[in-house]
Image: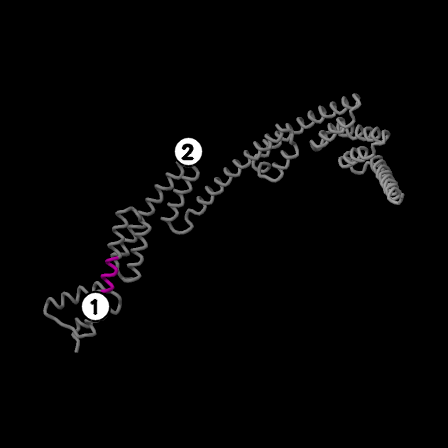
Amino acid sequence: METAECKRILSQSSDGDHKAAVDAYQTWVDDGGSCGETVQDAVLLSTTKLEEADSLVSRAFREINEGDLLKAKTSLNQALEVYPRYYWVSKLLRDLDRSMRLRAEGLQQEARYLQTQGDLAGALNRMRQAGDLLPEGELSGEISRLEVMIEGRAKRERAWNELARAREFVDQNRFLDAERVLEGGEARSAIPENVSSFLEELRAKRQLRGREAFRDARASEVAGDLDRAFFHIGSALDLGELDEPLRSEIIEFARLLGMKYYSQGRLTQAREVWSLALANDSGNAKLEEYLHEVQERLKSLRKIQEQDGDERSERP
């Protein structure tokens, strides 16, 4: 028959109050008392739980000394899982939470300082460290704000690189390539005013280069070099969309140039120059008419050539 003290010790162990059970049993034994096997087994279980919890607490103190408060908190929580009624560990956790909040406040201050210095990546790193020390989501707004700022900076850097690339193309008179760089990139949305100014500059340079090419085309035509004139017309139209009245003047010049080719019997060249002009002035009825006529004449010539070839092959 167990004594009242043994029953009390067994109750403490069963209720999970392991330290109280172990201490009470040790005092009872030291005073000459004894308990049955059931109580001894319960005390042994409590001793095991207490030792396991104390081992985790010791590890937590080492982690605190090393400055790793997150690991220390994990260790203390594990100790409470082993021994939920270990009140001293609960107090340690509350103290640790206060220390973690102080550490987090220091990290937030450092993050704000780094942001003023332009080190957004460093600021984000410190803010994330602070967020790890606080309840989940407490600093999510600050972290998101810094992430957006970093992405915005990266986007602007990409935009400036695109604009620099477009400028290189303009310097090479590759106006269409310059426009393609900006159409498919981020510069238009990231630095719209700079892009707008650049496009005005591009338009002016393209207009200037188009007039130079047109001038050279007319000079070549006056000199009787129709092929050279055609080359310069192609160069002008390859620049992209030209302003009026320059575009119309070039199209009209191309129409007349094609007529000169046609009158000289150079039908292929006439077809090519009219095709080029029509590609830049779709719906031009005169050009469509001329192009249809020259294509029909070329078909007729091919048929005549084929017939002549057949006749030669039939001669003995």
Is the residue under label 2 in contact with that under label 1 (CB below 8 Å)? no
- Res 311 → quadrant: top right
- As for residue 51 lying within the magenta part, the answer is yes
Q: Amino acid at mark 2?
A: Gln
- Res 50 → quadrant: bottom left
**Residue 161 pos. (x, y %):** 54, 34
**Residue 263 pos. (x, y %):** 86, 29
What secondary structure characterizes most of the magenta part? helix
- Res 301 → quadrant: top right
- The residue at which mark 2 appears reads as 117
**Residue 147 pos. (x, y %):** 47, 43
Task: Find the magenta span and give its range.
Answer: 48-55
Give the residue displayed 19% in from the left and 71% down from the top. 40
Give the residue displayed 21% in from the left and 63% down from the top. 19
Disc 1 from disc 2: Cα separation? 60 Å
Give the residue displayed 75% in from the left and 26% down from the top. 228
Give the residue displayed 33% in from the left and 50% down from the top. 70
**Residue 312 pos. (x, y %):** 87, 42
Indicate the colouring scheme: one colour
Q: Residue furthest bottom?
A: 1
- As for residue 30 lying within the magenta part, the answer is no
| Quadrant placement of the N terminus | bottom left
| Quadrant placement of the C terminus | top right
Disc 2 crowd rating (10 Å Cα; few below 14, some 14-19, many 20+) is few
Q: Please, what secondary structure does the residue beneath circle 1 have?
A: helix
Q: Residue furthest left?
A: 32
- The residue at which mark 1 appears reads as 44
